[in-house]
Image (cartoon, rainbow, N blue to C red):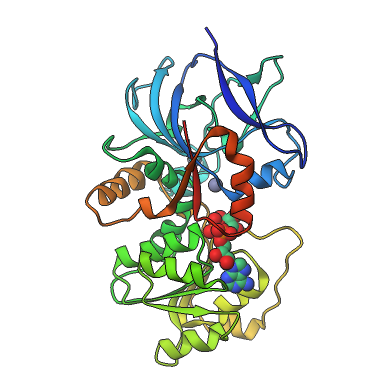
Amino acid sequence: MPHEVRGVVARSKGAQVAIETIVVPDPGPGEALVQVQSCGVCHTDLHYREGGINDEFPFLLGHEAAGVVEAVGDGVTDVAPGDFVILNWRAVCGQCRACLRGRPWYCFATHNAAQKMTLADGTELSPALGIGAFAEKTLVHAGQCTKVNPAASPAAAGLLGCGVMAGLGAAINTGGVTRGDSVAVIGCGGVGDAAIAGARLAGAAKIIAVDIDDRKLEWARGFGATDTVNSRETDPVEAIRELTGGHGADVVVEAIGRPETYEQAFYARDLAGTVVLVGVPTPDMKIELPLLEVFGRGGSLKSSWYGDCLPSRDFPMLVDLYLQGRLDLDGFVSETIGLDEVEEAFGKMERGEVLRSVVNL
Ligand code: APR
Ligand code: ZN
Ligand code: ZN
């Protein structure tokens, strides 16, 4: 029997989102039906509703979620009804060229549910990032469910499903931050603050937070920034160099996705240092860099997709660190809201008033 639940749908480009009745099929082979408990509001949800991702409207939004497995389809062995899970958008296939080379965190053929969720009139929905979790229940591929310790708060745990994992992973997995490193993070929203928290976890000695908003810099200190730079008032490249003995940081994480801040990251790193781009640019953006500087500075310029995470490896470990009090996931939850407040939450996100608004279901 299909399930009729409430979900937040973006019907057409730019139109405000609204709560609609969603029809969720019972799980087929390899699928799982999940009762969603919490789902964070992420920039990508807003990009979907603005038509910035693709034109496959209507979208069922929401993808940063935790919940409880209600039912599984044939052949599912990794999760079972009653399991507390974080939903991921990297259900690795095990067979693509990345997986076969032992690099599943790059998997190029990730799994999603085969069956479609629909509106009441049968119109097929496109779930955001193959998840669609601003809904009381959602249907995903079982590989999109990562079992974690149920003692964690769903609001905090769910954030590992996207933005917080992206930031933590940008520092730890992509940037390879390790004990004693100097790290600078440009842009201290939820993603940048997670990179700061990741740098602290990994043992960075100096963590420099850069933002144009003093309130964000204050929050960044809470996650582990040892120094802060307001780049509206101070040249961030000079400030980062000054704070690192004149050299620049070992790892600079760009968590905004803009050419000017990428350029700051490029020049603010030490020789042989690493730049990690985790902020997502728009198609019109371009950068121009002297090729001699690209060569002469050595090191590496990397992008971080979803924090280069492997959900099965990273989610349970990070939840355990959270439960031990070593990773402040609760600090990212600025407010909890209802399903009917997603549109308002987009506004707060755009005005920079929150790190994350989280829908509790
Ligand atoms: N210089 C420094 N900081 C800036 C600048 C700038 N020119 N422009 C914006 N910022 C700061 C904002 O003040 C804010 O604190 O960058 C931060 C961006 O944070 P959010 O808007 O909350 O975004 P977040 O959720 O952290 O995501 C950051 O990562 O995954 C991507 O799509 C996401 O591109 C986005 C980025
Ligand atoms: Zn693969
Ligand atoms: Zn997201």
* Residue 298 visible in this rendered orientation of the protein: yes
The total number of labels drawn is: 0
Residue 152 is left or right of residue 30, and the answer is left
Q: Position of residue 116 (x, y in %)?
A: 61, 21
Name the image quarter holding residue 21.
top right
Q: Nearer the viewer, residue 101 or 263?
A: 263
- Residue at the extreme left: 324
Q: Is residue 40 above or below residue 163?
A: above
Q: Nearer the viewer, residue 315 or 187?
A: 187
Q: Is residue 224 above or below residue 63?
A: below
Q: Position of residue 4 (x, y in %)?
A: 56, 15
Q: Position of residue 94 (x, y in %)?
A: 44, 37
Q: Position of residue 255 (x, y in %)?
A: 54, 64
Q: Is residue 115 above or below residue 336?
A: above
Residue lying at 62% horizontally and 64% vertically, measured from the top left: 257
Q: Nearer the viewer, residue 41 or 167?
A: 41
Residue lying at 59% horizontally and 27% vertically, measured from the top left: 7
- Residue at the extreme top: 1
Residue 124 is left or right of residue 23, and the answer is right
* Residue 131 visible in this rendered orientation of the protein: no
Residue lying at 44% horizontally and 80% vertically, measured from the top left: 249
Residue lying at 62% horizontally and 44% vertically, measured from the top left: 344
